[in-house]
Amino acid sequence: MKKIAGMALIIALCASPLLAQNRPFERAAGFPAAGALKEYLGLSDQQVSDLAAVNKLALEAAKPYMDQIATLRRSMKDAADKAAVQAQIQALHTDIQGVCATYRVQAQAKLTPAQKTALGALEAALQLQAAAHEAARFNLIDGPGRFGPGGRGGMMRRGPGFGGMGMPPAGAPMRSRP
């Protein structure tokens, strides 16, 4: 199950930049590279355009595999040998990983050495994401948007071991139950 979730993340990371748009992402409101990534790495407008072009090629190359996966998933409920269908899906995920790796090399070639170094820090942060979310669930750290507008409430909704009895952030008034 962890392998499937990991592969789904890889597919999402490779394909997500262009799934909902056909224009370069520097014009897409809210797309990370239009703001945070561009700022963090110090990307030029030309680099952003180059990365958008590489991502478009990657998506086009991965699309036939994604279409096959979608077809296999639809056929899964009627399949006599679900394990064989799942194995085919797994093989297609592996093929997509290869496509993503090829285009990742091309995308990284658009970066300066300093930008590649900064990218390494982002990669390390991504590896820590699962542990950070678990730490937030155990109220060891404050997670993103936990108690603010649109926050999910941290332990109050999903925290293990506390029976839904979460604590508000430090300094916030305690609510009494009616």
Image: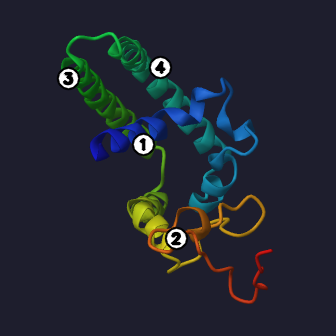
Q: Nearer the viewer, mark 3 or mark 4?
A: 3
Mark 4–mark 1 distance (CA, rounded to whole Å)? 18 Å
Badge 3 marks a residue whose secondary structure is: helix
Q: Nearer the viewer, mark 4 or mark 1?
A: 1
Which of pointers 4 and 1 lies earlier in the amino acid sequence? 1
- Decide if residue 14 is on the left or right side of residue 22: left
Q: Nearer the viewer, mark 2 or mark 3?
A: 2
Q: Amino acid at mark 4?
A: Glu
The residue that mark 3 highlights is: 83
Q: Does any portion of residue 117 appear in the rendered image?
A: no
Q: Residue 78 occupies which quadrant of the picture?
A: top left
Neighbour tally class for label 2: few under 14, some 14-19, many 20 plus, Cα within 10 Å: few
The residue that mark 2 highlights is: 163
**Front-most of 81 and 33?**
81
Which of pointers 1 and 3 lies earlier in the amino acid sequence? 1
Which of pointers 3 and 4 lies earlier in the amino acid sequence? 4
Q: Residue 100 occupies which quadrant of the picture?
A: top left
The residue that mark 1 highlights is: 9
Q: Against 176, is 48 above or below?
A: above
- Rendering coords of residue 40 (x, y %): 60, 62
Mark 4–mark 2 distance (CA, rounded to whole Å)? 47 Å
- Rendering coords of residue 74 (x, y %): 41, 14
Disc assigned to residue 176: none
The residue that mark 4 highlights is: 60
Which of pointers 2 and 3 lies earlier in the amino acid sequence? 3
Mark 1–mark 3 distance (CA, rounded to whole Å)? 22 Å
Q: Against 87, is 143 above or below?
A: below
Residue appearing at x 75%, y 68% in the figure: 148
Neighbour tally class for label 1: few under 14, some 14-19, many 20 plus, Cα within 10 Å: few
Q: Nearer the viewer, mark 2 or mark 1?
A: 2
